Each structure stands twice: as structure tokens, then as C-alpha cells.
Image (cartoon, rainbow, N blue to C red):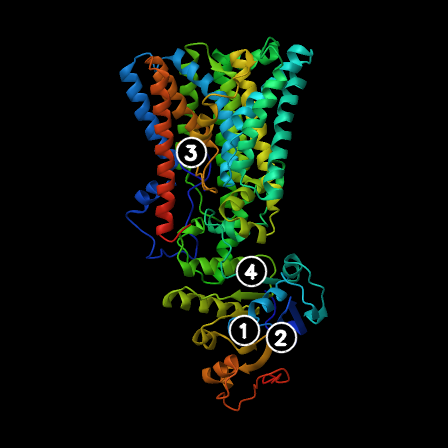
Amino acid sequence: MTATTNGEPLLALHGVSKRFGAVQALAGVDFDVRAGEVVGLVGDNGAGKSTLVKVMSGIYNADEGEYRFEGEVHNVRAPSDATALGVATVYQDLALCDNLDVVANLFVGREEQSRGPARLLRSLDEASMEKQAAELLQTLTVRLPSVRQEVGTLSGGQRQSVAIARSLIGEAKVVLLDEPTAALGVAQTEQVLALIRRLREQGLGVVVISHNLANVFDVVDRIFVLRLGRKAGVYEVSETSQEEIVGAITGAEFGRNGDGERGEQATGEATR
Amino acid sequence: MSTAAATPSEPTPPATAAATPDPEEGGRFALFNRVAQGELGSMRVLLGLIVIWTIFTVANDRFLTSTNLVNLSLQIAATGMISIGVVLVLLLGEIDLSVAIVSGLCAAVMAVLCEQHGWPAIPGILAGIATGAAIGLFQGSVVTRFGIPSFVVTLAGLIGWQGALLWVLGSTGTVNITTPAIVDLAGTFFTGATAWIIAAIVVALFAVASLDARRRRLAAGLAAATPLVVAIRVAAVAVVSFGVVAVLDQDRGLPLALVILIGFVVIFDYIVRRTRFGRHILAVGGNEEAARRAGIHVTRVRIMVFVLGSSLAACGGILFASRLLAVNQSSGGSDLLLLAIAGPVIAGTSLFGGRGTVWSALLGGLVIGSISNGMDLLALPSSTKYMVTGGVLLAAVVVDAAARQRRMRSGRV
């Protein structure tokens, strides 16, 4: 969690293409997210949202294009490369272990071992992990009955919050959220949106993929629309409307003559 | 994850600083739900044990005598040892049907080396355990490399290793054990002062561990168990430890085999609950995909668990051979497999992975052993014994599956 300055993009992709056999999933897409900014990534099914996120999280290697993090070009070949840079991903299925408690889930895969004499017994440092977990959840104002509660017993919104909080253990600078509010009730959705705003306050770059435009308008600063694997436009939330975004997503002509046109050349750049 | 009763030293989980009780979480019925959902499996099994002991004591007043309890502890030592390995495999959500026959095969390897080739006891025992480790490595590699259900791979093992056992034993089909050090494993009893000192050491270690955990939590500024709670826990462990010694000391004494079993249970319980490797076992058992994404080397964890499972089976087989003073063609056969798997499941370790404790190997072994021992005292025929044991296992599995269904219905997996 670092400084909250806008300006230089934290994570930027330039001219990214990805092809699966005959399907051109992404064609020359530019994308960027800055510190302290929430970017919504929207598009119809098959528009390439998931592919783009998987390129950012290192699951897919782009066929072409440049991956820049904090201004430098990086060769991201595996999820661990992206994690090492500080790009954390929260998948739609949350990837939580329901049989483990909140602390164990937050630290799974990077458990801390005790120092001092207990080190010889290779004992986990539960006290330290629990303390950090409680502090982290408190800064995010995530409310849970207990950090020692089994994750399986938590509500959907609480589970989503734990999954997001987990991405912040370690030094995440960019968090990618895949459909964070799908399958949540109204109150729980509000919890998660509030959490996303707090991530922004902490100076992280946040990318939210969502089908729910109302949610997107609620929380994001910029909206990035993908259509058929191409960038269909970038819009400042304050200067656009849901109708315009729907138009960009579907490619319909009724989109108001805004700054975001469809098509390859329409790198509308409404933002800069 | 951790269950009540026999699991030592974990202070009661405190609420976080940020904690406000969520209205969705049940208040009054929380405890009932947890028992019903199988999370307090150890509590359930202790109650079951009391019922079973009461029934058999009423039916036959020799059941609760020191002599019989020494017999009982010898009977469960070998099975319990195999069950520890079964628990590890079950925690992964896998199963190993070859443990019983592997225990027989590894004991046969040890017996042949020591009795027919003149090996000293220690290298012979190590060779037996190494055989188990190699078998686990092989089966675990096949399961992970080809993605075959462990149930099928180890079923093939069940038959294949039976053949290997017959081959190792050769034409005579039986090897008697006379090597003193091996005979001593099940033939040594601690009496008087030695037994009491062992119990005192157990209590002292538990007290030190509890106080250390408390000290570290306080140092980190977390809520910790009050001194009274720590004192009550230590007192409970003291009552059980000294009680066991007091009872067994009236007969032959505290069996070495029981000490070995409890030692292994404590060590593996520690590994599962307190080390990174154990945490990774639970994570893989809970959600393999999540574990993989978290950077856990899933394949390595699974192979390691199969290696440990078969190695512990070998240790159990060696204890068995020591008690029976022989290895023969029926070693590792009969109902040993059923008992070794039934024990942990009865005591609350889930067949679906991720939930259970190493203590369930000991507690479940005690339940199954008590039923079997009690029915022997009543001189019931084998037909009845098999049917009762099968019924108890079925009941335990139904309880486990019902608990899982209830969890899924309340939106949990």
C-alpha cells in the first residue's frame, strides 16, 4: 500500500493481442490503471474481459504487446511473476479454503514461521499472523465475528471481503477483482463496494470486472469497454451515462456522440 | 479445524478488534449446530466411549480391570499407528486402501531380514519402514502423475502387495520373531517410578507449551486464555495421564507400545496443526485449486502424505509383529484395513477431506478396540462381531455425510 498519487499508470498494457486457435480474443488492446484509481472493465460475454485479466495476472501470455509495471517493461510469464510485481487477483470463485479459519486463509501459501527457539520446531507464528490479520481487517473495516472463524461459516459478502483482504497480504499495488458482486445480496454488495473504495483510499490501483453497470457506476472512476476483443472506448464516469456505456458494449448506434466511439481506432482517450 | 477435548494448548479464539457479531451467525443454537455439523467430533466420540464402556462393564465386570485395559492398549497400539497415516491421507480428501497389507508386507521385510539374514534389529526396522516409504512414493506418484483416484490405485496395491507379502515370506509362509529388540517393542512395560515420571514429563511438556502459547499471544497484544483456563487444561491432562498410569500400573504396567503410539500422535498432531506442511495438507484437502493458486506445491504435498501414510502403516505392522511374535500370510489381512480406516472416521475425521484431527486415530482406535475387546470378553461369535463393527462404521460415515450435507445446505462446502 503505497502513495496515493495519480499520474503515471501503475500497470499499463500496450497493444496486447491474444489468439486461441481461430478466435482472436484480444486485438491490440491498450489498458492502464493508476494508483488510487478504480477502473471498471466491462463488455459483453466473449468480449475478452477474462482474457485481458488473465494476461494481467500472468495466467496467459500475450502473443503480442507490452506489459509495463511502474513504467518498466516486465516479462510476466506466470501468476507468480505478477504477484511478485504486486499485482494480486481475486477470482470469481474466491479460492478460499472453507475448512480453514480467516487467519489461515489470509496467509495460505505464505505462512509465517516462528523466530527464536520455536524456529527449530518449524512452528507457525500464529500470534503474529493473527495480529496482522486483525490489523488488516480493521484498516479495511471488514467486520467479522472472529478472525478464528472458519471461512465456510461466513456470509457471501464476508467471504468476498476475506478474499480481497488476502490479496493485500504481501505488497499488492494493483488488485484485479473478477465479478466481486455477482451472487451477493444488496447489503453485502454495498459492503464490498465500500471495501473497494477503501482500497482506492489506500492508494491501490483497482480493476473491477463486472456485468452490473449500476455497481460499476457506483464505485469506479473510469470505465473501460471491450467489444469483440478490441477496446471500444474509455469513459470518465462523471462524463458518461449508462446508456452510452451500453451502446459501447453492444455496438449499437444509439450511443450518444460522446468521446468513446467503437472500433479499433476509437481509442477515444476520453481520459487524458 | 482444531477440535475440542484432546487437542492441547490452543487458547480460545478471541474476537477481533473489528469484531461485531454478525446477525446472520446463529447465537443460541451455535453450539448445538457445531456438534451436529461434526465439528466437535472429539466430544461426540468421548461420549460414545463412555456409553460403550458402561455397557460392557455392566455386561462383564472384567472389562474395566487393569489387566483388560493393558490388553486393550496393546490391541489398539498397532491399529492406531496405521490410523495416523490414514488420517493424513483422509485430510487430503484421498483414501489409501493398501495400508493394512502394506503394514503386513513391511513387517515381513523386517522379519525376514532380521530372522533369516541375521540383520540387527534397528537396520531391520528401518528397512521395513523404508519399504513403506517406497510404496507410498510409488502409489502417490501414480495418483498424482496420472490423476487416477487414489481409491483405485491403492485397491490395486491392496492386491499387489498381498502377492509381494506371500513372495517375501517364501515357502514356509510364516516367520517367527525372536530378535530381542523387536520383541521388546510390545513386550516392554514401565512400572512404578518410571511410569509416573513419564506421566509427569507429559504433563510438564503440556504445561510449558500452553504457557508459551499464552505468553506469545499476550506479547502480540492478542487475547489469551486466562491463567485459570490454562490451569484447568493442565489439570485435565494431569488427571488423564496419571489416571492411565495408576490403572495400568496395577497390572503389567504402562506398555511401551502405547507410549510410542501417543508419542506419534502428538508429533503428527503438531505437524498437522502447527507447521507449514500441515497447513498445506489442510489447504489442499479443503480446496485444491485454491491451494494451487496460493503457490502451494500440491503434487509434492500429496506425494509426501502418501509416503507418510505408508511409512506409518509400516510402523504399525512392526508393532503388530512384535505383539504376535510372528509375521505370516494373514498379516495385514482380515478386518485390519476396516478397523484402521473406521477408527478415525468414527472419531470425526471426514472422508471428504480437510476436516479432522490426528487425535481421532487414537480416540477412534479406542472406540473400535473397546467394542472388539468387549465382544471378545462376552465370547460373542465372529458373525456378531463383524456385523456390529460394520454397523458402527456405517453409522459413523452416515453422521459424517449428514454433517456435510447440513453444511452444504447452509451454504458451506
N-terminal label among 1 and 2 = 2
The residue closer to the viewer here, B328 or A257, is B328
Residue, disc 1: A41
Q: Which element carries disc 1, helix, strand or loop?
A: strand
Q: Residues within 10 Å of mark 2 (few under 14, many from 20)?
A: many
Q: Which mark is residue B345?
A: 3
What's under tag 4, amino acid-wise? Leu
Structural distance between the alpha carbons of marks 3 and 2? 53 Å
Q: Which element carries disc 2, helix, strand or loop?
A: strand
Q: Which element carries disc 3, helix, strand or loop?
A: helix
What's under tag 1, amino acid-wise? Leu
Looking at the picture, does residue B373 appear above or below residue A112? above
Task: Report the number of discs.
Answer: 4
Structural distance between the alpha carbons of marks 3 and 1? 47 Å
Q: Are marks 1 and 2 in contact (CB under 8 Å)?
A: yes
Looking at the picture, does residue A229 appear above or below residue B133? below
Q: Quadrant of the C terminus of chain A?
A: bottom right
Q: Residues within 10 Å of mark 1 (few under 14, many from 20)?
A: many
What's under tag 2, amino acid-wise? Phe
Q: Is residue B397 visible?
A: yes
Q: Which mark is residue A31?
A: 2
Same chain letter for marks 1 and 2: yes
Please tell me which residue is depicted at 40% across the width and 64% down the height of the picture: A184
Q: Name the subunit of mark 4.
A: A
What's under tag 3, amino acid-wise? Val
Structural distance between the alpha carbons of marks 4 and 1? 21 Å
